[in-house]
Image (tube, coloured by chain):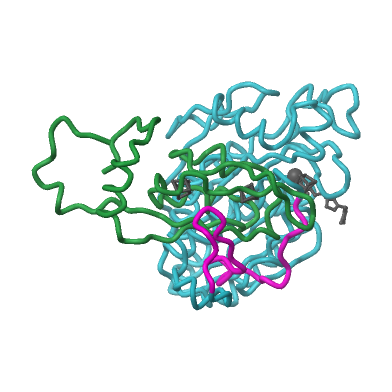
Amino acid sequence: MSPSRTDSATRNASPTAPPAAERTALRHPKDLLLREDRLPHIWCPTCGIGTCVASFIEAIAETGIPEEKFAVISGIGCTGRVAGYVKLDSFHTTHGRAIPYATGLHLAHPEMKVVVFSGDGDLVAIGGNHLIHAARRNLDITIICVNNFIYGMTGGQLAPTTPHTARTTTSPKGNWEYPFNVPHLVASCGATYVARWTSLHVRRMRQAMREAILKRGFSLVEIIAPCSTLYARKNRLGTGYDLMKFYHDNCEVRHGADTKELDIEFQQKIAVGKFVDVEKPTFLDRIGAGRKK
Amino acid sequence: MRFWRTPLDRDKFECPHGQVFIIVERCKGCAFCVEYCPRGVLEISEKFNKKGYHYPVAVREGACVDCNLCEVICPEFAIYTECRNECAEDEAAEEASAQPEGGEGTS
Ligand SMILES: Cc1ncc(C[n+]2csc(CCOP(=O)(O)OP(=O)(O)O)c2C)c(N)n1
Ligand code: SF4
Ligand code: SF4
Ligand code: SF4
Ligand SMILES: [Mg+2]
């Protein structure tokens, strides 16, 4: 489903229809929620971020909430560019600080649906503290974390999500560290909705995003996505096309799995699914309750 | 596609058929749409766009069921489909041209 399927004759100026197999167009139905003048975007061929944005646009349409009620906040990074491509209220903030901006916006405008759309480095490395405290407070915001296991924008440095033994620019002999298990991190801090999918699972990802947006409370959707230019290349995994095939063959749907068991090992099975979906008073609910006393 | 038994309410259901549109200059030739289209509608063209990427073409458009997967999986917002409702005629035409690979049922 797309935001609105207006007749292509009105969208595309060309009056003469070319033969069936070569029917080209100038505009896309999703352009209604995209800053078209900025397309094509900067993401590399076979990068997974664009697919996440396509699913996100569908999820927004599916919620039925008017688009002026949405605000998208991104930090810095390749994924951080999302705020600049969506035609919604958006903030492109400083590195790691998307959640503080989102917190302020949410508290000042509780009627807005505040979505933080950013990368693993931005949200879990430099922004890690904001992430855990937003989850602890149960702020009613949604986090979409595109986890490509690396700092894409700055040249492929090690991230706290890089799997053990994976090679990056700053771990040329393979990563020695234990990576973060993002769903477990936020679940243990009190998140009320936690799911993980990959950029291959377009429909499940859309459903998870919709549920996360509609959730009253802190929600996070982690999306494993290919970084073709750095992660795939440094690890000789081919391109994003090959990583999509890898996800196809190696993802296991495990709804409700114990988040402790969701560690990601280098090129091993990836557990995906919805892991947490609980109800709990939000930060604003608690402020309200405190005031009444 | 020939049915061994025609479902009694077949005439009440219209199988969706899609028309494929491609925004050639946005495509970066990733081939996700070609790989994941469940009906094998698309193929990468011999031709390429201004940036040198080979874009997809709908070589078996008659088989498109407007499932919209190509549109969502495309990272570039470069392909989409629209439903056309001339299903009955098209199915007849398809049956006549006897598609060789027709696996599962079309309605
Ligand atoms: C305060 C500050 N420190 C460091 C940087 C450099 N920097 C820009 S993006 C980035 C990492 C982005 O990684 P991630 O969030 O995973 O995004 P990706 O590019 O992988 O989508 C870094 C370290 C910066 N812009 N600002
Ligand atoms: S560097 Fe990696 S994450 Fe960034 S656009 Fe390219 S493929 Fe995507
Ligand atoms: S709408 Fe579905 S069947 Fe039609 S071309 Fe796209 S993926 Fe294939
Ligand atoms: S998925 Fe999009 S970018 Fe990739 S080949 Fe198809 S139309 Fe081009
Ligand atoms: Mg990253």
Q: Toward the viewer: B95 or A229?
A: B95
* Whether residue A69 is situated above or below residue A148 in the rendered picture: below
Is B21 rendered above or below residue A69? above
The residue under the point 13% across, 38% down is: B6
Residue A20 in the magenta stretch? The answer is yes
**Residue drawn 60% across the image and 30% down it:** A245
Residue A277 is situated, as x and y percent measured from the top left of the image, at 43, 45
- Give the tally of numbered discs: 0
Among the chains pictured, the one given green colouring is B
Q: Which of these two is toward me, A268 or B99?
A: B99
Q: Is residue A175 above or below residue B17?
A: above
In the rendering, what colour is chain A?
cyan
Q: Would residue A139 be visible to someone looking at this image?
A: no
Q: Measured from the top left, where is residue A287 in percent x and y?
A: 51, 68
Q: Camera-side residue: A190 or B93?
A: B93
Residue A64 placed where, x, y %? 40, 68
Residue in the image at 68% along x and 42% along y: A147
Quarter of the image containing the C terminus of chain B? top left
Q: Is residue A74 magenta?
A: no
Give the image location of residue A181, x and y in percent: 64, 34
Which SS type dominates the magenta stretch? loop
Query: Which residue shows up at 84% across the image and 30% down it?
Result: A234
Q: Quadrant of the N terminus of chain B?
A: top left
Residue range of the region highlighted in magenta in the rendering? A16-43
